[in-house]
Image (cartoon, helix red, strand yellow):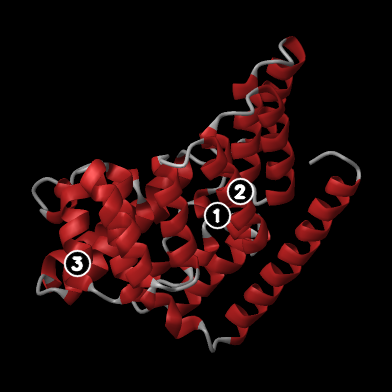
């Protein structure tokens, strides 16, 4: 619903009642991820790790914050921690895939993902990652194959029904893939359906509908101004979750030369620098 202050108050009450309840600290970390406070996310992950030091999921969450802060040196340090806990852990391949995607190395990312696929055939995370890698690499047929397995209902107007409401950004990308792989008409219909829902229905349920990214849909519809306005609003409110992945979408490359987009990226650079400084300060104070 987007009521972040209310959510934080609920979590704080849980922590007050049970300071050893690790899950509460994890939820606080995820809340901070939602609001773009990655320095604070790292703090709450650390608090949770003090209670549950062997939990590999916490290390994965930690790397989400580190990629958002463009801190790949610490990212590699976290990978080493996980390898020390369990040299055969599947999450190591996940981290290798993320690191390769971050570096723009699709071939290396696919190598790690193929290794995972052999062990987690049909896993939604694997399929979603495979589709994302192919999107970043411009391989529309490969992306279509992965996303058809992940969300088969999205690909047929007779069945997409409520499916497009599960993920605005994925539905926008599916529309783009349809239009680029011979299904122009259903792609346009899905695009119109998603945008109508995003603009007229979703605001009735959420305080911040811009949390859900429809930038690709607006660009597909030829409305660059709305796409830029949405990006500006997202950054203003701290909704830049997985920004490094989003900006590598081929559709967003047309915004790179737009002065408004350049300004947004400058704001994000400043945010990263400030939050990295906050992380260094917390480390010096023994909070991390």
Residue that numbered label 3 is attached to: 142
Residue 56 % position (x, y): 52, 35
Work out whether residue 237 or residue 253 is closer to the camera in this orientation and state it: 253
Identity of the residue drawn at 34% across and 55% down: 129
Identity of the residue drawn at 75% across and 69% down: 270
Please, is residue 165 above or below residue 262 in the view? Answer: above
* Eye-nearest disc, 1 or 3: 3
User: Are circles 3 and 2 on residues that touch, CB within 8 Å?
Assistant: no
Residue that numbered label 1 is attached to: 241
* Eye-nearest disc, 1 or 2: 2
Work out whether residue 8 or residue 243 is closer to the camera in this orientation and state it: 243
Q: Earlier in the sequence, mark 1 or mark 3?
A: 3
**Secondary structure of residue under mark 1:** loop
Residue that numbered label 2 is attached to: 78
Q: Residues within 10 Å of mark 3 (few under 14, many from 20)?
A: some
Residue 226 % position (x, y): 48, 71
Is residue 279 visible to us here? yes
**Secondary structure of residue under mark 2:** helix
């Amino acid at each position: 619903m987007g009521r972040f202050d209310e959510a934080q108050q609920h979590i704080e009450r849980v922590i007050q009642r049970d300071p050893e309840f690790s899950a509460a600290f994890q939820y606080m970390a995820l809340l901070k991820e939602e609001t773009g406070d990655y320095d604070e996310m790292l703090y709450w992950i650390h608090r949770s790790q003090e209670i549950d030091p062997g939990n590999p999921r916490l290390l994965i969450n930690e790397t989400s914050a580190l990629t958002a802060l463009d801190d790949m040196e610490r990212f590699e340090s976290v990978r080493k921690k996980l390898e020390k806990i369990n040299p055969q852990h599947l999450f190591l391949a996940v981290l290798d895939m993320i690191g390769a995607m971050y570096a723009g190395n699709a071939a290396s990312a696919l190598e790690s993902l193929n290794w995972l696929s052999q062990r987690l055939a049909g896993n939604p995370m694997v399929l979603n990652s495979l589709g994302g890698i192919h999107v970043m690499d411009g391989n529309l047929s490969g992306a279509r194959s992965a996303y058809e397995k992940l969300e088969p209902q999205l690909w047929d107007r007779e069945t997409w029904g409520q499916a497009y409401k599960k993920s605005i950004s994925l539905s926008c990308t599916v529309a783009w893939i349809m239009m680029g792989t011979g299904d122009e008409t259903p792609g346009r219909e899905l695009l119109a359906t998603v945008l109508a829902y995003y603009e007229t229905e979703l605001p009735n349920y959420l305080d911040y509908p811009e949390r859900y990214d429809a930038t690709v849909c607006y660009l597909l519809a030829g409305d660059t101004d709305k796409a830029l306005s949405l990006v500006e609003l997202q950054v203003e409110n701290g909704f830049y979750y997985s920004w490094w992945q989003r900006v590598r979408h081929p559709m967003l490359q047309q915004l790179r030369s737009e002065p408004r987009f350049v300004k947004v990226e400058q704001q994000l650079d400043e945010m990263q620098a400030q939050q990295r400084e906050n992380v260094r300060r917390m480390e010096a104070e023994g909070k991390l």
